[in-house]
Amino acid sequence: MAKKQFKTESKKLLEMMIHSIYTHKEIFLRELISNASDALDKLYFRSLTDSTVTQTRDAYQIMLAVDKEARTITIADNGCGMTAEELEKNLGTIAKSGSFDFKRDNEQKEDVDIIGQFGVGFYSAFMVSEKITVTSKAYGAEVATIWESTGVDGYTVREGEMDTHGTKIVLTLLADTEDEKYSEFLEEYKIRSLVKKYSDYIRYPIKMAVSKTQKKADSDEYETLVEVQTLNNMVPLWKRAQSEVSEEEYRHFYTDKFYDYEAPARTIVQKSEGASTFTALLFIPTHAPYNYYSKEYEKGLELYSSGVMIMEKCADLLPDYFSFVKGLVDSSDLSLNISREMLQHDRQLKVMARAIEKKIKNDLLKMLTEDRTKYERFFDAFGLNLKYGVYSDFGMHKEVLSDLLLFKSSKEQKYVTLKEYVEGMPEGQKAIYYASGENTAKIAMLPQVEAVTSRGYEVLYLTDEVDEFALRVMETYMEKPFKNVSTDKLELEGEEEKQALEEENTQNADLLTKMKGFLGEAVAAVKLSATLGKHPVSLASEGDFSVEMERVLSRTPGGEDGPKAQTVLQLNYTHPVFEKLKTLDDDKLATYTKILYSEARLLAGLTIDNPVEFAQLISEVMQ
């Protein structure tokens, strides 16, 4: 029998497809099952207008079989089959796609959802096979045709026999090597896992004969039975009407597919038509994975094209700040590359990603409104990521995320939204006040917090390192500016208080200048304040870079040499300590100044530059 050559420019094209186009060898089963599904689709669509096609829809199927001794895998379907001419046309010409032609010729028909586009998926089987034998019989034909090839050497075509219409592909696997274990594809568990991973939602049953060992009745002996099992679910959960799917079904789907022991906090179903037609099934987890805030965590949604999984984690569908979302997207509109492993361009993805982002935000806002307890638990797990989302990209996403943020506050130290804060502001309050620190207890003890709350104003407690950076990027919320209570320009005083303070600063200018001299470059200035309540001293920030921001950056690698906050040592001129300062000689004033500065740093949550000197100064005063 004469061997024929592939009708391409050279053997190099086939070699490239076998060795370069596909990333994972296991993809061959997905491709062959998808081709079988297309063949079934073609016969089904033909039956809609051709009365000679009598096969009922429930008879359509794809059969898999494994023979370990012969090292073969068989994929068979009872679809439209191919004539000898069609076999030559579709398999003898690389990149000739009968599925693409069919889809193009039937675009006007509804429910045409053919998967194949490029006609190269079949050749992925050569990645694992030393020989491929295809036996096909067109529907209504009398004779079958056998196409056989060992790869780039060409192929043979001859007449054959087949009991029914359809196509049967037999792969003879390559021998195992030190690097590649092709025998794994002969294991039942591997076939099951690949069908589950890539082809679970092919619309036709994928069946395989499975051996089962069971104990004989009334005997201690065991027997082996063979039964045919369906390996795939066929109808995707997300393609069913939402009203027909119970919460229990969604929960089981989520916990099984994403290996979570806890039900999701929220299930989101999105069906979109228009610029991009797709269905999304998304889940908001209740808790963060153990590696969520690490470099090992990979974001992304599963991406399906007409029920066939194309990508396990499509990162482009989720912004980083919603990276905690699990789920999948299914679309028949995707423009895939030749291997169906990647998208040819990202325009469609961008349209889908924008719609998904909007849907996630709206559902989170809905959860915030409908179930505050559940939302607060969600925020405890993922709120930090939302804050980083506000801060990243120079605040580009603040409009998306600002309404989702929660902060503990001075009012009962409970969570509040920014909207709730602003709506609760008393008349005359001009800014949103916040204070930063390691925890709410320490923040509450800050002198500046007491000064603000004593006037009836609420203070947001910022305890995460990114908090202040995020608010600085936001600048305002509902036209209200954010203001750090530790700034030297808090401006809480009335006109009379301001005038009295100016007079005190003027009268004590010499004393303040001396104290600044004792501290050198450690502070930008020493000033008097009327808003420290019962506290004698505090450390305030001058300019946009705060003491807390310095503390955060100092803990990063190389942060010791990073930027420093321009600080102002504030003295409470109504406190007895200040009266004492006015009576001291220069030596004692220097000692007291350094002690007060160290005290102010401790209150601000900063370390003392020279703890040994501080201890000696305390001992000196005590003596």
Image: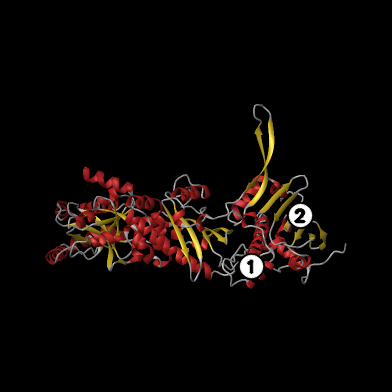
> Which of label 1 and label 2 is nearer to you?
1
Q: Position of residue 60 (x, y in %)?
A: 65, 56
Quadrant showing the N terminus: bottom right
Kind of residue sitting beneath label 2: Asp
Residue 163, disc:
2
Q: Residue furthest right?
A: 1
Q: Secondary structure at mark 2?
A: loop
**Dot 2, how many residues are within 10 Å of its Cα: few (below 14), some (14-19), or many (20+)?**
few
Which labelled disc corresponds to residue 511? none
The amino acid on which the numbered mark 1 sits, given as a three-letter code, is: Thr
The residue drawn where x is 79% and y is 63% is 152
Residue 369: quadrant of the picture: bottom left
Task: Return the residue at label 1.
Answer: 49
Tell me the quadrant of the picture where the C terminus can be found.
Answer: top left
Residue 337 placed where, x, y %? 62, 67
Q: CA distance from mark 1 to mark 2?
A: 25 Å
Q: Which is more toward the observer, 319 or 62?
A: 62
Please tell me which residue is depicted at 30% across the width and 67% down the height of the picture: 476
1 or 2: tag closer to the N-terminus: 1
Find residue 11 and report its horizontal and vertical position in percent. Answer: 78, 67
Location of residue 159 (image quadrant): bottom right
